[in-house]
């Protein structure tokens, strides 16, 4: 089932490690030489998809278990214990159980997926993930015919997670997808970024990535996957139902009460970066058929 | 000699005007760091600069409210610094607004729609507007022209502005966050203290 979705980008578009690690230094040095145009920046200019640097991806995060500041997760997430890691798979599955992470993923294909990542707060990045199609994992545990939704849960390690102690949200963080969304080829469980194990602040050791939905749907550091026939509760909806719906598809035509969703700011452009238009489904129109007949201004 | 007398004595020869220079230098320094994406400005300088200016403004507004109770409780008299504190607060609010308008939403049309559509922006903008007449009249000439009583009455708008500013911060925060709550409790508390004090004085008289 792997390779059901093709990047328009290829492996060559992933920035060489030396460049993504210190693009800023290279640029600074190059600017000094007046040779900025000569700096190798692997990118797909046509698609406008130049992956953010690993430094950017790792230092600007929302992971409220580690604090509400954007830099807090990078500062505090080293306390997260990620090994050993097991995932409880339960509900309407043929083979429920507590799976060691390695066992759950054994034999499945890890792919490179360069995706846009759009936060509900109207900023965005481009992230070169390494991950496994969620469908492959679900097929491995055997989804029963009555199941219609997938629920996910983030780990809670209160002694290691400062935000959990402060009760910023009603932890554990929970999320969910409709089964057809979960089985869509775009939906992956990421275990790496730029070919390196995913950093704790990015959701180690395994997280969901649903590129056509706002970032908070892509739940991090998952310890439980439950198949169910009921729409599962999701954390931000519990915290503020008026602002966060179950679907939370990226949609420039439906404003969030706090942020206009018509445009966004791509991280990495500096202090004078221009805003850019937000794309319907974050630029993944192939998911539109999932919502045929649904009024997306109602099902937010 | 009491501690307050010592502090007041030490401050006798300290002028208020360097505060303006310190504030301007600090604002410029933060801007420079944002341009060069240093420290906290590494990844997303616009949002961080917007927050930095906003939070400094809020701190200074609360500090302005602290001057009177500090004198009443401890005898330490910082009244000669209060105008500078208030004006610097306004300058940071202005800088906060300019980052929002020019660097963040990037168009006057968006400033307007954001102000109209988002209650937390509405509240923040209202606080900004309320502070404008206060900044304009923060000089001796205005006090003379208006008369001390009318001037003092006008400047009670700062009470409203601080509370709105804290509300603005609380409202834009996602989830349950302690820091904005602290500002809101502080500002409401400090304003309430003044009215309780007034009521107490009336009772006594």
Image (tube, coloured by chain):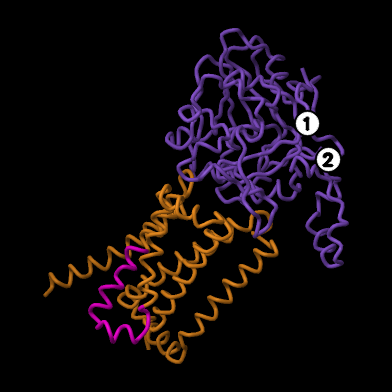
Residue found at x 56% / y 46%: A162
Residue segment shown in magenta: B137-161
* Residue for badge 1: A7
Q: Secondary structure at mark 1?
A: loop
| Main secondary structure type of the part rendered in magenta | helix
Q: Is residue B99 left or right of residue A189?
A: left
Residue B140 position (above or below residue A286): below
Q: Secondary structure at mark 2?
A: helix
Q: Residue furthest top?
A: A145
Observer-nearest residue: B123 or A37? Answer: A37
Image quadrant of residue B11? bottom left
Residue found at x 46% / y 51%: B114
The image position of residue B76, as x and y in percent, is 37, 80
Residue found at x 40% / y 54%: B122
Observer-nearest residue: A236 or A128? Answer: A128
Q: Which chain is purple?
A: A
The image position of residue A298, as x and y in percent, is 45, 28
Total number of numbered discs in the rendering: 2
Colour assigned to chain B in the rendering is: orange
* Residue for badge 2: A13
The image position of residue B88, as x and y in percent, is 47, 74
Sequence-wise, the earlier of marks 1 and 2 is: 1
Residue B78 position (above or below residue B125): below
């Amino acid at each position: 089932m792997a390779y059901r979705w093709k990047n328009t980008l290829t492996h060559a578009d992933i920035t060489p490690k030396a460049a993504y690690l210190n693009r800023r230094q290279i640029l600074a040095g190059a600017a000094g030489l007046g040779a900025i145009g000569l700096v190798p920046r692997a990118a797909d200019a046509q698609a406008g998809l130049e992956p953010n640097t690993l430094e950017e991806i790792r230092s600007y995060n929302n992971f409220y278990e580690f604090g509400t500041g954007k830099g807090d997760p990078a500062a505090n997430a080293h306390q997260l214990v990620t090994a050993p890691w097991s995932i409880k798979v339960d509900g309407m599955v043929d083979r429920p159980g507590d799976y060691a992470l390695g066992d759950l993923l054994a034999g499945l294909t890890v792919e490179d997926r360069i995706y846009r990542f759009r936060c509900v707060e109207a900023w965005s990045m481009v992230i070169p993930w390494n991950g496994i199609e969620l469908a492959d994992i679900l097929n491995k545990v055997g989804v029963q015919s009555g199941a219609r939704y997938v629920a996910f849960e983030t780990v809670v390690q209160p002694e290691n997670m400062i935000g959990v102690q402060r009760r910023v949200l009603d932890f554990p963080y929970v999320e969910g997808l409709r089964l057809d969304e979960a089985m869509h080829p775009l939906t992956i469980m990421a275990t790496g970024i730029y070919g390196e194990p995913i950093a704790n602040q990015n959701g180690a050791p395994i997280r969901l990535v649903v590129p056509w939905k706002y970032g908070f749907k892509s739940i991090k550091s998952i310890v439980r996957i439950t198949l169910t026939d009921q729409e599962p509760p999701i954390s931000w909806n519990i915290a503020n139902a008026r602002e966060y719906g179950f679907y939370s598809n990226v949609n420039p035509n439906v404003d969030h009460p706090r942020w206009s969703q018509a445009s966004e700011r791509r991280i990495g452009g500096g202090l004078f970066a221009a805003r850019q238009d937000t794309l319907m489904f974050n630029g993944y129109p192939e998911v539109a058929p999932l919502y045929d007949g649904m009024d997306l201004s109602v099902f937010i | 000699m009491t501690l307050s007398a010592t502090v007041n004595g030490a401050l006798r020869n300290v002028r208020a005007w360097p505060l303006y220079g310190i504030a301007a230098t600090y604002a410029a320094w933060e801007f420079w760091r944002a341009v060069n994406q240093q420290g906290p400005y590494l990844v997303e300088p616009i949002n961080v600069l917007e927050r930095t200016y906003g939070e400094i403004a809020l701190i200074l507004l609360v500090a302005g409210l602290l001057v009177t109770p500090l004198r009443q409780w401890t005898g330490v008299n910082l009244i000669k610094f209060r105008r500078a504190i208030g004006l610097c607060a306004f300058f940071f609010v202005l800088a906060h607004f300019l980052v929002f308008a020019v660097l963040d939403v990037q168009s006057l049309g968006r400033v307007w729609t954001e102000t109209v559509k988002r209650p937390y922006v509405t509240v923040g903008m209202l606080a900004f507007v309320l502070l404008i007449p206060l900044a304009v009249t923060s000089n001796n000439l205005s006090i003379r022209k208006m008369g001390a009583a009318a001037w003092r009455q006008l400047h009670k708008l700062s009470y409203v502005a601080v509370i709105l500013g804290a509300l603005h911060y609380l409202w834009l925060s996602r989830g349950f966050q302690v820091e904005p709550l602290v500002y809101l409790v502080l500002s409401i508390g400090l304003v309430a203290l003044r009215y309780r004090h007034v009521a107490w004085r009336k009772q006594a008289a």
